[in-house]
Image (spheres, rainbow, N blue to C red):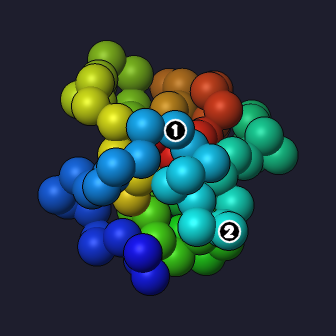
Amino acid sequence: MSGWPRYPPCASGTCTDVVCCAHGHKLRWPELLGKNGAAAKATIEKENPEVTAEILTPGRVGPPNFCCNRVFVIVDTHGNVTNLPTIG
């Protein structure tokens, strides 16, 4: 596959894990833990142009489905990343 369509809608094809989804691009961003959420979103979308990073603020829950073209950026009340951003 040459690439995923922009999210939404969710796209995964036959992939069920992040390695399959990555198509050789970056799939996890541990260096963004504790960083500003908006800056993290920009970094993720630059480093993997096949995904859309979606910021989830406190109290907001993303859908439980697995998507190869989405990364949730979960932030705290100060807007800093609290969970490891990963494709899915």
Q: Quadrant of residue 7?
A: bottom left
Q: Report x, y in % for residue 77.
A: 50, 26
Q: What is the quadrant of the C terminus in the image?
A: top left
Numbered tag placed on residue 17 in the rendering: 1
Q: Residue furthest left?
A: 9
Identify the residue at the far top of this view: 59
CA gap between label 2 and label 1 equals 13 Å
In the depicted view, which residue is nearer to us: 88 or 47?
Answer: 88
Above or below residue 9? Residue 50 is below
Residue 40 appears in the picture as rendered: no
Mark before the other along the chain sequence, 2 or 1:
1
Helix, strand or loop for disc 1: loop
State the image coordinates of residue 19 (x, y, percent, origin top left): 62, 48
Quarter of the picture containing the N terminus is: bottom left
Residue topped by disc 2? 24
Give the residue type at disc 1: Asp
Task: Indicate the position of residue 24 as horizontal and vertical percent values.
Answer: 68, 68
* Kind of residue sitting beneath label 2: Gly
Give the structural element (helix, strand or loop) at label 2: loop
Q: Is residue 33 above or below residue 27?
A: above
| Left or right: residue 6 compared with residue 54 | left
